[in-house]
Amino acid sequence: MFKFGSRSLKNLEGVHPELVEICNMAIKRTSTDFGISEGVRSLERQKKLKAEGRSLTLNSMHIPQKDGFILTSNRDEAKSRKFASFPAYKEINEQKVLFPQDGDAFGSWIASSNKRLVNLLNGAWEKYKHQPPYRKSRGIVLLESFEYDELKEFAYDYNFDNIAPFTLVGLDYKSHLKMEVLRWDGKSISYKEINPNEAHIFSSAPLYPEHIRLEREKLFAKFLHDNEQITASEMVNFHQFGGNDNAPIKLSEDHFVHTISITSVVKNGRELSMKYHDLIQNEVKMESLQNLKFER
């Protein structure tokens, strides 16, 4: 079996995680040795190649994109919950929105458009008392957030009365990358922006008491420390097999609720992909928003 030399590995640094994954898979399976001659380019080199006629654009995807990210989300649900559909497009407020759809309430816990990505977690700050009936599913609320141009506008204009507590984590990439956290605790709304260039881990307050949330943060910090360059696959692997008995990342079937799917969203430049891992049916499907034009 062939393997990449130090030069090829160096050239792969900073390349889109999905492309790195494909290259690593290819070198293990190929019958003919090959190497990586070039990966990420500087703007200066791209200008030189264009001037020489060896490239046609200054907007090459070889150039590092400063607004990229990997977001991975576990869905923990009761065993009685109906299967969710695989990610598909639907039109909301004259824009294409990509999301897996819940089989019971027909909302979603994660959705992306050409403007932003939003991820839903049940609960706000602490465990709360469940008091149905509620006026609307939180998954429907998430989808209705796409009717607003800004998540901040949604936070202060939307009617959250009689909606169960929740947290929304948003990544807005219309012009520059912005990370937002919205929390509704059943009485008041909280909105703030956080640093999108730092790694973050969020845990559902009803499922994980504070000491377990803190332990999961330590495990995540160790994972980041031990992995210099993290791919989307490694992040999914952490969400599926990371943690320990005291602070699991993936909930097993021994719990009242268990992890039924893992969704991984990767954005690099104008390309965004959503990979959905159905752990119950053992199926994986990927959809891409690469044909949509992101505002620059």
Image (cartoon, rainbow, N blue to C red):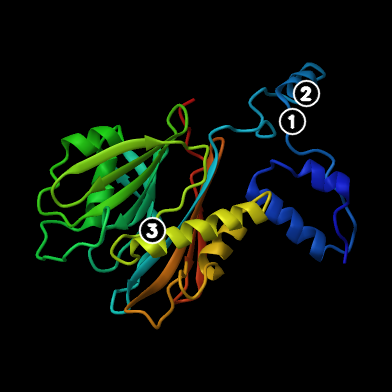
Which structural element holds mark 3? loop
Q: What residue is disc 1 on?
A: 41
Looking at the image, can residue 232 be seen? no
Q: Answer whether labels 2 and 1 touch (C-beta < 8 Å).
A: yes
Which circle, 3 or 1, is nearer the viewer? Answer: 3
- Left of 139 or right of it: where is 174? right
The residue where tag 3 is placed is 203
Q: Is residue 60 above or below residue 107?
A: above
Find residue 189 and report its image quarter.
Answer: top left
- How far apart, in angstroms, are the residues tagged by discs 2 and 3? 43 Å
- Callout 2 secondary element: helix
Residue in the image at 55% along x and 61% along y: 236
Name the residue furthest bottom: 254
- For the N terminus, which image quadrant? bottom right
181 up-or-down from 260: above or below: above
Nearer to the camera, 133 or 212: 212
Q: Position of residue 124 (x, y in %)?
A: 26, 53
